Amino acid sequence: MRVAVAGGTGLVGRLVVDAARERGHDVVVLARSEGVDLTTGSGLAERLAGVDAVIDTTNQASQRRAQAEAFFGGVTRTLLAGGAAAGVGHHVVLSIVGIDDVDTGYYAGKRLQERVVAEGAVPWTVLRATQFHEFAEQVLGFARVGPFSVVPRMLTRPVAAREVAQALVELAAGAPVGRAPELAGPDRWQLVDLARRVSEARGLGRRVVPVRLPGAAGRAMRAGALTPSGDGPRGRVTFDEWLAER
Ligand SMILES: NC(=O)c1ccc[n+]([C@@H]2O[C@H](COP(=O)([O-])OP(=O)(O)OC[C@H]3O[C@@H](n4cnc5c(N)ncnc54)[C@H](OP(=O)(O)O)[C@@H]3O)[C@@H](O)[C@H]2O)c1
């Protein structure tokens, strides 16, 4: 099978590329650093020739609603138009557990991405996953003042990005299913505890300052809205195993 990985140079996208190659698939990477800009579509048509499935792991960092919606909506429309023209049979998107219940600008962008895919012309699968184990390290850099890192109080059930990548490749090789069962890691954690553990294990010297994010979104995150409520596949790699590996 020929698979195009949009965002295949990113944190999880790189692991999708590895997982697809390990299974013997032919891989095409779609990213600006590979000559494809998915906000404009430049370079896309020629890369999609002969592609059976697209796996979208693109990302942008802004929390602003307008910017997040412009990126996730725009990139998705571009990929679907290119996919329909090239006869791509399956469009697979990585999304996030709980985005309907936590109204942030970033999640508004992810919700729009899912809607555009569901209304699009290419048969689709959306996999919602929880935060990656790597998120605990990223969050230490979001709001820093001297040695202090401000970390939101939130309940999470983190999963190894590697296992998310493997799940995306498996889904892409199967028939489109629409919304796939939500993927989460083996254990529930407070994000501030994960951030402290990662800082200690890596000798980063960050002092974690927990903060209660205001409003309904903050309350929902503390109450576990970003963890799955039903059954579904669970990753096996624990946070501590992941930490010890690196
Ligand atoms: N972090 C988490 O815990 C988590 C959990 C569940 C789901 N997710 C989802 O996983 C996805 C990937 O996240 P990530 O952290 O792995 O992303 P990332 O490391 O920030 O990588 C983003 C990728 O998107 C590409 N990209 C950005 N703008 C582009 C453009 N205009 N055209 C083409 N490619 C573009 C980048 O490559 P270039 O810079 O070369 O263009 C890069 O390959 C996101 O959709 C996120 O919502 C994340």
Image: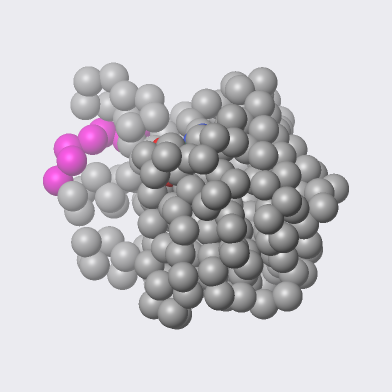
Count of numbered circles on the image = 0
Examine the image and state in which quarter residue 92 appears.
Answer: bottom right
Q: Position of residue 230 (x, y in %)?
A: 73, 67
Q: Nearer the viewer, residue 48 or 80?
A: 48
Q: Identify which residue is drawn at 69% across, 61% down.
A: 88
Query: Camera-side residue: 75 or 237?
Result: 75
Q: Please tell me whether residue 112 belongs to the stretch shown in magenta.
A: no
Asked whether residue 111 is in view, the answer is: no
Q: Residue at x 48, y 31 (%)?
A: 61
As rendered, which of 157 and 37 lies closer to the eye? 37
The residue most toward the right is 119
Range of residues picked out in magenta: 203-209
Would residue 162 appear left or right of 59 to someone viewing this image?
Answer: left
Q: Residue furthest bottom?
A: 23
Residue 50 appears in the rendering: yes
Q: Is residue 103 above or below residue 92?
A: above
Q: Residue at x 59, y 36 (%)?
A: 41
- Left or right: 35, with 244 as reference point: right
Is 2 placed above or below 10 here? Answer: below
Q: Is residue 230 above or below residue 64?
A: below
137, 196: nearer the viewer = 137
Most extreme residue toward the left, as rendered?
203
Q: Quadrant of the C terminus?
A: bottom left
Q: Classify residue 122 as left or right of residue 207.
A: right
Coordinates of residue 103 in the picture (x, y in percent): 70, 33
User: Residue at 55% of width from left, 75% of height from top?
Assistant: 1
Percent x, y for residue 226? 62, 49
